[in-house]
Amino acid sequence: MPFDARELFARVIQCEAGGEGDDGMRGVATVIMNRTNIPYGEFARVSNGGNLRAIIAQPGQFNCMRDTLAGRYNSQNVWNMDPQEIHYEIADWAISGGILGGVDNSLFFYNPYSPTCATYFPPGGVGVLHNRINQHCFYAPTERYRNT
């Protein structure tokens, strides 16, 4: 049985940022909702007017939505998560319009596993470094994103 959008969102928050504290989880949730609600570019087409599930399930976007990574089973996936109340609270906060200051309109994030963040992410210059919260770097869309 597939998860409803809220359950899937809580699982993605836990999976992508569960070890990043409240602000890290709120940052990831903010990015996902920004993608859901942006009125232009690739994510606007994917969300088709605000479909959270479509954004979360978009192929290639979240490692937690993959069964395998680099040809190996990915044990850290949404199907193996056991969300706690905090993950649902953050999902509800984001769905109701919560935006973490410092993440603002960011559309991209990643953990570089290093003390520094690249200036642009993803490749192609569609996101520019906006902020870092704990281990995640957050990227605001550039003008190039508009044409994706």
Image: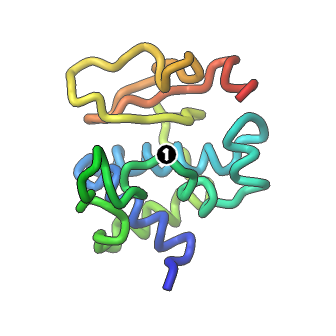
Identify the residue shown where x is 60% and y is 53%.
55
Picture quarter containing residue 18? Answer: bottom left
Total numbered labels: 1
Picture quarter containing residue 85? Answer: bottom left
Picture quarter containing residue 70? Answer: top left
Disc 1 marks a residue whose amino acid type is: Gly
| Image coords of residue 28 (percent x, y) | 43, 46
Residue 96 in the figure: left or right of residue 6: right
Residue 114 position (above or below residue 3):
above
Considering depth in this image, is 32 or 46 the residue closer to the camera? 46
| Image coords of residue 101 (percent x, y) | 49, 36
Q: Which residue is most to the top?
A: 119
SS at circle 1: loop
Q: Which residue is most to the front?
A: 71
| Image coords of residue 16 (percent x, y) | 35, 51
Colour option used: rainbow
Identify the residue shown where x is 35% and y is 71%.
79
Identify the residue shown where x is 42% and y is 69%.
88
State the quadrant of the C terminus: top right
Considering depth in this image, is 76 or 19 the residue closer to the camera? 76
Considering depth in this image, is 98 or 68 the residue closer to the camera? 68
Would you name the residue on which mark 1 appears? 60
Q: Count neighbours of disc 1 (C-alpha within 10 A) and say few if under 14, some if 14 to 19, many if 20 or more.
A: few
Identify the residue shown where x is 54% and y is 56%.
56
Residue 67 position (above or below residue 139):
below
| Image coords of residue 105 (percent x, y) | 60, 34
